[in-house]
Structure formats: structure tokens, C-alpha cells
Amino acid sequence: MKKPLALILSIALALGAAAATPEKNLPLPGEVFLVKGRTAFVIPPAKPPAGTPIPWVWYAPTLPNLPGDAEKWMFERFTAAGIAIVGIDVGESHGNPDGQALYSALYAELTGKRGFAAKAVLLGRSRGGLMTLAWAAANPGKVAGFAGIYPVCNLASYPGLARASGDYGLTPEELAARLAEHNPVDRLAPLAKAGVPLFAIHGDRDATVPLDLNSGLMRTRYEALGGKMELVVPAGQGHNMWPGFFQCEPLVEFVLARADRTKPPAPGR
């Protein structure tokens, strides 16, 4: 028995919609959707603000298994305070221009179509620091603050130029010659000029992302530019899952204080 054409079309459309709906496990309930073919998510605040833009934290790296349960404690603090958490999977892009373009696409989606505030607080964990800081340096007016958990701030330190160069479409030698164009610790001036505050918690025994070549170097350079950065250094901690990294009260307080709660201008102003 032949199925009616309309039924066949409805089944095809349903299957296509199912195939286009990405799947992702999140530490808190949220929406998963696509932006430019990439998996993105929004974890909404417990009580969205009425009549004002939604303040938000932008988490990275959003890889298949991240964010994870380690982030749940601070995410609960954010949502309880009326702040959304968002992210987009840009792969192992190491802050390259393609990844930054996807970040800009998510920003446009959230601020242009979903009522999100004009400025985000960026939250970079490990190599998520490269992703968020690279975009922030190019978009300082869209950033309310940056917070990092042992963030990578220096391409030369991690993943190293040999490994990162392919993501930039360059040879290691070409990337070395053009490092100042791409390396977050070399691109801090726009953020300092815009008065964007920075925060990081970074262990002094981190062998994967060394403190002195990343958060420590960033603070030294940022303060030399007139910027403000708070750095918490837990003694004896490395690049690990120590709960103190993910249940850091100063980090939460930094985010809550800097989340953009600006009301839109009155009509005619």
C-alpha cells in the first residue's frame, strides 16, 4: 500500500528536524541548538529578569563533554542570581579566526534574537582561555569581564606553536613571526583601554599550563597597561580537578559583580 505524498513529506521533515537537533548533556537543564552548524547551549536563569536584557556568562571550552559536573556548583550560583550560562562548540580551535567568527555568530544570535545583554562575562577553563580571550581582544566593547580557571593565555606555552599553527593555517615559523596578531597575552591593550577587569585562579604547580607563562604573565602585562586583574594562586595545586578551582567564592563574586544588568535606554533617548 502506497503512503500518501503528504504523509511521506511529513515523515521526511520530522526526520530532518530530528537529525538537525543536536544532543548534549549539560550539568543543569538548558536548551541545545545549532549556530552555523555548531552545537550551542543556553542554561537559563532561575528567574529571568522582567523587561531587561538577560545577563550572561560565556563558558569555554564547550566540547562534547564540557561543561561538566565540576561546573555545576558555580553554575547554580549564577542561575540563582538571574544569570544565564551559554557556550558554543568551536572544536580545538585554540582561539583562531574561524573560532572567533563562530563566537561572533553566537553573540549575534543571543543579543539580536534572544534578549541577552550587550556585554558578557567570559569564563575560560584551561584552553577555553585561548578561545575567550582571543575573541575578547577583538571585541572589548562586548565584554563585561573575564574569569579563568587555570586559563591558557599564551599560545607559545600551550599548545605550542607547532601544534597550534595548523589551526591558524600557518607553518610554525609563520605563526611565530605573526604571534603578536594572535596571542592573547600580546593583545591585551584593547581590553585594558576599555577597562575590562580580569580574574584567574591558577595553581603554582601547574605543569600543563604554567602559571608564570599564562595567568602570571597576563597579570604582569595587564597591570603594565593600566588594567586590573585579580589572581588567586592555590599553593601546591596543578592542572587538576581540585574542587577549590570550581567552588571558588572569589570567582563567583567577580562574575556576579560584573554581569551586565544594564537596562535598555528609554524610548526616544
Image (cartoon, rainbow, N blue to C red):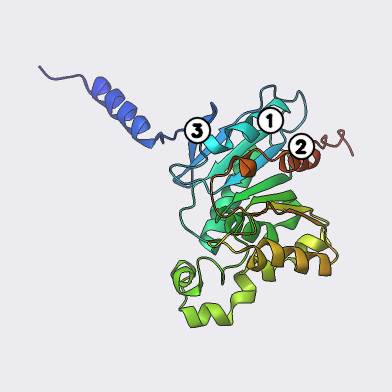
Of labels 2 and 3, earlier in sequence is: 3
The residue that mark 3 highlights is 26
Q: Real-space Cα distance between discs 2 and 1?
A: 9 Å
Looking at the picture, tell me which residue is in the foreground, 53 or 186. 186
Q: Which mark, residue 191?
A: none
Residue at 68% across, 30% down: 77
Of labels 2 and 1, earlier in sequence is: 1
| Residue count near mark 1 (Cα–Cα under 10 Å), binned few <14, some 14–19, many ≥20 | some
Q: What element carries label 1?
A: helix
Amino acid beneath label 1:
Arg
* The residue positioned farthest toward the right in the image shown: 269
Q: Which mark, residue 77?
A: 1
| Residue count near mark 2 (Cα–Cα under 10 Å), binned few <14, some 14–19, many ≥20 | some
Residue at 57% across, 55% down: 238
Looking at the picture, tell me which residue is in the foreground, 236 or 122. 236
The residue that mark 2 highlights is 256
Note whether residue 114 is visible. no
What quarter of the picture does the N terminus occupy?
Answer: top left
Note whether residue 150 is visible. yes
Looking at the picture, tell me which residue is in the foreground, 66 or 191. 66
Image coordinates of residue 105 in percent, x first then y, are 57, 49
Q: Real-space Cα distance between discs 3 and 1?
A: 15 Å
Image coordinates of residue 48 in percent, x first then y, are 70, 24
Quadrant of residue 42 in the image? top right
Q: Do the residues labelled 2 and 1 touch (CB within 8 Å)?
A: yes
Q: Real-space Cα distance between discs 2 and 3?
A: 21 Å
* The residue positioned farthest toward the top in the image shown: 1
In the displayed structure, does residue 149 sit left or right of residue 231?
Answer: left
Residue at 74% across, 33% down: 53
* The residue positioned farthest toward the front in the image shown: 236
